Image: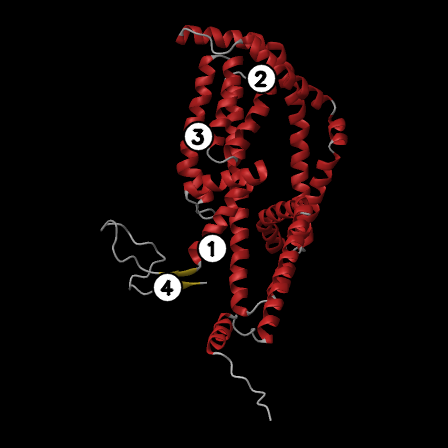
Amino acid sequence: MSDDTTEVPSAVAHAAQAVKDERPAASPPAWVNTFVWQAAWKVVIVVALAAVAVAVVLQLRHLIGVLLISLFFALAIIPGVEALVKKFNMRRGAAVGIIFITAMVAVVLMVAFLIPAIVQFAEAVGTHFNEWMDQLNAWSSDLVGGEVVDTTTAEEVTAPMLHAVQAWGDNVLGVLSSGLGLVFDVFTVLTFTFYFAADFPRLLRAIMRRMPPERQQVVGWVARTSIEQTGGYFYSRLLLMIVCGTGAFFVMLLVGLPLVYALPMALFMGFVSEFIPFIGTYLGAIVPSLVVLAVEGFVPTLILVAYVLVYQQIENYVLNPRLSSKTMELNGAVAFGGAMAGGAIAGPMGAFMALPVAALITSIAKNTGRTYEVVAQIEAAEPQPEDESPSGEATSRT
């Protein structure tokens, strides 16, 4: 009987063991592969949904912008709506309608007076432009020994703009027909503004029903703060615009500036000075001053500049603290940065809306979260803010 078993040489056994040691570890359990595949599919789904959401937002960015502008104006008129509702016990929709009618009448009257004034102003500038430039250069030659503006170059630059203004004023209906998209956007903003302002309590309740009571308090506070900041900013700026523009209008008439120049320049000064942050104060004064200098001369310009300087002091120390201190608590650097960011994102309308938005964000940051007393004061005599606890304990805000 033969022995079928053969003894494996030791060298071969050692080589087989080495090959076995070099083999990779055993395959992972089946649940690991399942988890990896599920995670991968979830990542793919999330990325796909994010891409679809970005595409939808890009397609609807114009509508989103219209909704944001409408919400801004709705928040601005809500304080007036609520005042009418409480004082006269009227329906909310009727109060919004009264404010809308008042605003439309004001705009129509302003346009009815302003468009002819702008057209006449453009015609007068085109007629007397060379004469004004000669007077300005003569005045600068006597004062500094040189001309300020090259008449030929200035005329070439301003002639197309003046012609465009005259053509626009002579054919307002043509402008409206060529700008149907703008007209449609305006009516869309008005429509959404009406519904936001009229149904704001109902919309807010519908949103808050989906939240727990603690979160409802936070959302309610944010909503009230939004209304206070936006409405207070809008009404205070509008009142300051009326005061500034009215004073400038009478000063221009007093120094002899014709009505056709004084009306658009006063409106320009009031709006630009109050609704454009920082540079608006200087821009709103420079342009009317140059017009007065070109038309009436040096002394009337000094009178207008003196009015601007005196009014700015009255506004900064008397009017502005009483009108804006309780509605917009905003650091100057934050206001400047917010206006720059808003202008970069959405142009002039973004800069216009940036200040109340920045004030709202600042209020939320100041009134939420946990704060602590400062251990080491920078100055011993520095007064403590009202929101700091003198006992050194942390204070929590909602």
Distance Cα–Cα, label 2 vs label 4 = 61 Å
Lateral position of residue 201 relative to residue 191, left or right: left
Label 3 SS:
helix
Mark 2 vs 3: CB contact within 8 A: no
Earlier residue among tags 2 and 4: 2
Label 1 SS:
helix
What sort of colour scheme is used for the picture?
secondary structure
- In this rendering, which labeled residue sits more in front, label 2 or label 4? 4
Residue under label 4: 395
Q: Residues within 10 Å of mark 2 (few under 14, many from 20)?
A: some
User: What's under tag 2, amino acid-wise?
Assistant: Pro
Earlier residue among tags 4 and 3: 3
Earlier residue among tags 3 and 1: 3
What's the residue at 59%, 10% (across, down)?
Answer: 128
Q: Nearer the viewer, residue 77 or 159?
A: 159
Residue under label 3: 311
192 over 21 or under it: above or below:
above
User: What's under tag 3, amino acid-wise?
Assistant: Tyr
Mark 4 vs 3: CB contact within 8 A: no
